[in-house]
Image: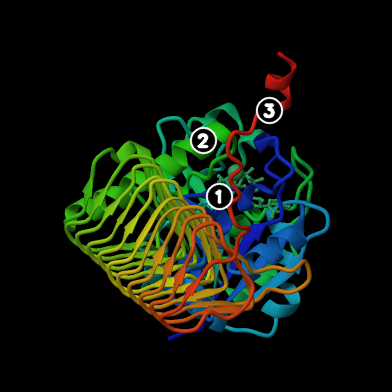
Amino acid sequence: MAELTSIILAAGQGTRMNSSLPKVLHPLLGRPMLQYIVDASIKVGSSRTIVVVGFEGQQVIDTIDQGHGLGQGQAQAQAHDLQYVWQKQQLGTGHAVMMAQEILSKVDGDLLVLYGDTPLLRAETIQELLKTKRTQQAAAAVLTTQLVEPKGFGRIIRNSAGTIQGIIEEKDASTEERKITEVNTGVYCFEIPLLLKALHEITPRNAQGEYYLTDVIKVMAGKGLRVIGVVTAAAEEVMGPNDRIQLAQTENFLKQAINQRWMSSGVTIQDPSFTYIGPEVEIGRDTTVLPGTFLQGKTIIGEHCIIGPHTKIIDSVIEHHTTVQFSQIVQAHLGPENNVGPYTYVRPGTVSAAKVKIGDFVEIKNCQIGIGTKVPHLTYLGDSELGAGVNIGAGTITCNYDGVSKHRTVIKDGAFIGSNANLVAPVTIGEKATIGAGSTITKEVPDNALAVARSKQEVKTGWRSPREREK
Ligand code: UD1
Ligand code: CA
């Protein structure tokens, strides 16, 4: 099969977004718009993807390279040949493709042209265009669609035999041409060497003074090359959001599709309109997701969990029969039958075993927590290792940071930490040791020992306060 390369045009600002952030980086369900189309490009089997950047281009490159919210696709995407080319001045869609000329002149096969702002475009739809182009051995194929309201789009010009002659932009179109309802979606597939030849022949002599990519269709058709139009019924897939109103509509569309898929596979979603599940999240059967929940990145939720209400989980694993309510969990792994929340913040690097309780107003960062351990309330644990069956009293703080370095706290199996203890790291609390309430622990506590480190209570009987003495 011929080699496939994709080019994604993402140099524009997206003026109507009225934003300092380039349009293609605005997130939908926690991931940048551009990421969706990069993934689609990988999914259709492109061996390389070229992204044309311009407005805030470095930010676009960094975001995509960091695999922001990439989740599952990350490893796949890292192995993928992703290249960037700059288009410093946005002189039109044809000009944008020309920026990749050097790369393209060294490769054969087909080029898919995609836009960075069409996150709804499915790989299946692109595949249909590609397949038709190849079976009909066309030099170029354009994905088109019929619109009742074609305003703003390029119109497809066909002759009486139905063969495509060209594409006319709205601003250059005559009144007659504007009546055409078949429009250009902006998705194309070209034979690379033929496209490069045609690109040399386009000029910016048009209403917008731009190098239109659409003009290569006319050039190719004029040379008698086979140019075909593939009509798709999925018009909503190629509609990129142009402003923030459409951005919300686009996210809503994606959200509904994803939520419906999970409900069909046995997940209860109490209020699908107020539940935001990212495209790479996985959820087990008989789990309930309650309103106000955001599941993002590569998050995996087991079976029979209750997630929410008002919970955000990013790039984390939650094993079966675990409950998380009113909480935020980031890059953590919670074991089975855990009970988390309300108002818990679980931060990166935290791993819990089975039957762990992490209760209200608890923040946990980079901790390993053993089976059956309880951290019920008002606690900060950082860089710590907790054994099995440990009980952490209210107000316990691990003082893990001395202002320069982070240090570890080890709390062994069955230890009991009294309320309001400060554990100054590095420190180890032995097995079944007990820490008296209010202690500031700075030295190792052996197994089975009691450590109390607080000033002794003094009681003065019959004492009258200065206020009372004045009376
Ligand atoms: C384009 C098509 C039009 C089609 C419509 C579908 C042309 C001339 N017209 O028009 O026929 O109906 O898409 O949406 O191609 N971009 C760059 N560099 C540039 C210009 C654009 O990277 O110099 C990027 C933009 O960031 C955007 C995409 O290309 O993602 C499309 O550009 P836009 O200006 O929106 O094209 P339209 O005028 O909508
Ligand atoms: Ca557009």
- For the C terminus, the quadrant is top right
Real-space CA distance between mark 3 and mark 1, rounded to the nearest whole angstrom = 63 Å
User: Which residue is drawn at the image coordinates 37% and 76% (left, top)?
Assistant: 370
Count the marks: how many?
Answer: 3
Q: Crowding at label 3, few (<14), some or many (≥20) Cα neighbours within 10 Å?
A: few
Q: Position of residue 388 (x, y in %)?
A: 35, 76
Q: Residue farthest to the top?
A: 471
Compared with residue 342, is residue 109 higher up or lower down, i.e. above or below? below
Q: What amino acid is at disc 1? A: Pro
Q: What amino acid is at disc 2? A: Gln
Q: Is residue 276 visible to the viewer in this orientation of the structure?
A: yes
Q: Name the residue under label 1.
A: 27
User: Which residue is drawn at the image coordinates 67% and 43% (left, top)?
Assistant: 14
Helix, strand or loop at label 1? It is strand
Real-space CA distance between mark 1 and mark 2, rounded to the nearest whole angstrom = 13 Å
The label nearer to you, 1 versus 2, is: 1
Compared with residue 104, is residue 11 higher up or lower down, i.e. above or below? above
The label nearer to you, 2 versus 3, is: 3
Q: Which colour scheme is used?
A: rainbow
Q: Where is residue 46 in the image (x, y as percent from the top left)?
A: 50, 77
Q: Mark 2 points at which residue?
A: 246
Helix, strand or loop at label 2? It is helix
Q: Mark 3 points at which residue?
A: 465
Q: What amino acid is at disc 3? A: Ser
Q: Where is residue 43 in the image (x, y as percent from the top left)?
A: 43, 72
